[in-house]
Image: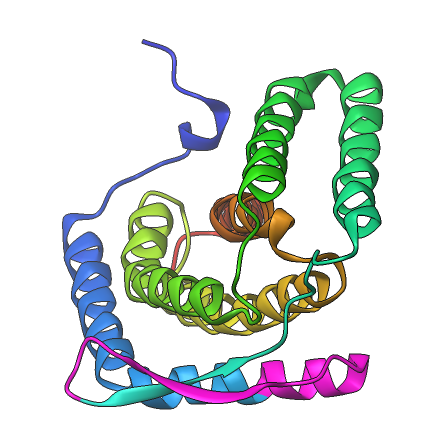
């Protein structure tokens, strides 16, 4: 069986794999134990971004963490469609035009664009027939933080699996593991700030689309990016 070219230089070292998994477990436990501090830093960074962009904050609420402590979550207002049917139309039409333009120009994206348009259509129908009564982003932010926290815990394991099959020195693999975990926290704060700001101006109709594109899909693309960069480095450096 022919392997993909990214695996042709693989030379598995059982001791190295065990070491990487042990370090991944230690880092995951550390992230879980410091979850309150990490989410606090995440939300502090997001508050600064929202302040810089002029999006008002509604205040902090507490949400249960995986431990015994509660963690702070910053909420922001979400635009209402009451008496503003034009806003609902604009919030649906503008993203639809962008998605259709990408669909027409990038053939490889067509399946994804159809999926995104379907999500937008479902959300538009729901808002038209049963407008959301929520005036803030509380549910969206709580759901986002809980899902991202799980991804932060899993990130060291994912990077350990990917880097253990690449010809990298053990210390370089550790740097990739720690760097990817730190990036996941920072990148999540930036994405969530963008989504909260967009909901403030456009209303809740984009909630499902934003979560799918800037949530799950963005995390997957980030993981692919780190793997690609590690592969590129592995082809240039001898095994240490």
The residue lying toward the viewer, choosing from 146 and 86, is 86
Residue 9 lies, with reference to residue 209, above or below; the image says above
Residue at the limit of the structure toward the front, as seen here: 83
Q: Position of residue 213 (x, y in %)?
A: 58, 44
User: Can you see residue 3?
Assistant: yes
Q: Residue at x 59, y 85 (%)?
A: 58
Q: Residue at x 47, y 52 (%)?
A: 238
The residue lying toward the viewer, choosing from 26 and 85, is 85
Q: Residue at x 49, y 25 (%)?
A: 5
Q: Quadrant of residue 47?
A: bottom right
The residue lying toward the viewer, choosing from 84 and 117, is 84
Q: Is residue 110 magenta?
A: no
Residue 21 lies, with reference to residue 109, above or below; the image says below
Question: Please, which colouring scheme is shown?
Answer: rainbow
Residue at the limit of the structure toward the top, as seen here: 1
Q: Position of residue 187 (x, y in %)?
A: 57, 67
Residue 32 lies, with reference to residue 115, above or below; the image says below
Quadrant in which the N terminus appears: top left
Quadrant in which the C terminus appears: bottom left
In this rendering, position of residue 57 left or right of residue 183? right
Q: Position of residue 161 (x, y in %)?
A: 29, 48
Task: Please count the marks in the image.
Answer: 0
User: Can you see residue 172?
Assistant: no
Q: Quadrant of residue 175?
A: bottom left
Q: Which residues are magenta?
A: 45-68
Q: Position of residue 41 (x, y in %)?
A: 48, 88
Q: Residue at x 40, y 30 (%)?
A: 7
Q: Is residue 54 magenta?
A: yes
């Amino acid at each position: 069986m022919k392997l993909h070219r990214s695996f042709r230089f693989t030379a598995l070292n059982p001791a190295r794999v065990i070491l990487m998994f042990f370090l991944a477990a230690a880092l995951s436990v550390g992230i879980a134990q410091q979850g309150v501090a990490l989410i606090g830093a995440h939300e502090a960074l997001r508050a600064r971004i929202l302040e810089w962009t002029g999006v008002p904050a509604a205040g902090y609420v507490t949400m249960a963490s995986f431990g015994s402590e509660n963690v702070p979550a910053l909420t922001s207002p979400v635009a209402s469609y009451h008496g503003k049917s034009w806003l609902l139309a604009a919030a649906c039409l503008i993203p639809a035009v962008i998605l259709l333009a990408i669909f027409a120009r990038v053939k490889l994206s067509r399946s994804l664009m159809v999926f995104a348009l379907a999500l937008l259509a479902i959300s538009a129908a729901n808002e038209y027939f049963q407008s959301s009564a929520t005036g803030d982003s509380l549910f969206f932010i709580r759901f986002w933080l809980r899902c991202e926290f799980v991804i932060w815990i899993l990130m060291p394991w994912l990077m350990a699996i990917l880097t253990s099959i690449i010809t990298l020195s053990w210390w370089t693999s550790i740097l990739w593991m720690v760097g990817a975990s730190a990036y996941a926290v920072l990148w999540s704060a930036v994405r969530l700030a963008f989504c909260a700001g967009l909901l403030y101006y456009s209303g809740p109709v984009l909630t499902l689309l934003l979560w799918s594109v800037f949530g799950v899909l963005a995390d997957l693309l980030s993981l692919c990016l780190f793997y690609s960069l590690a592969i590129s480095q592995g082809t240039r450096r001898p095994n240490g």
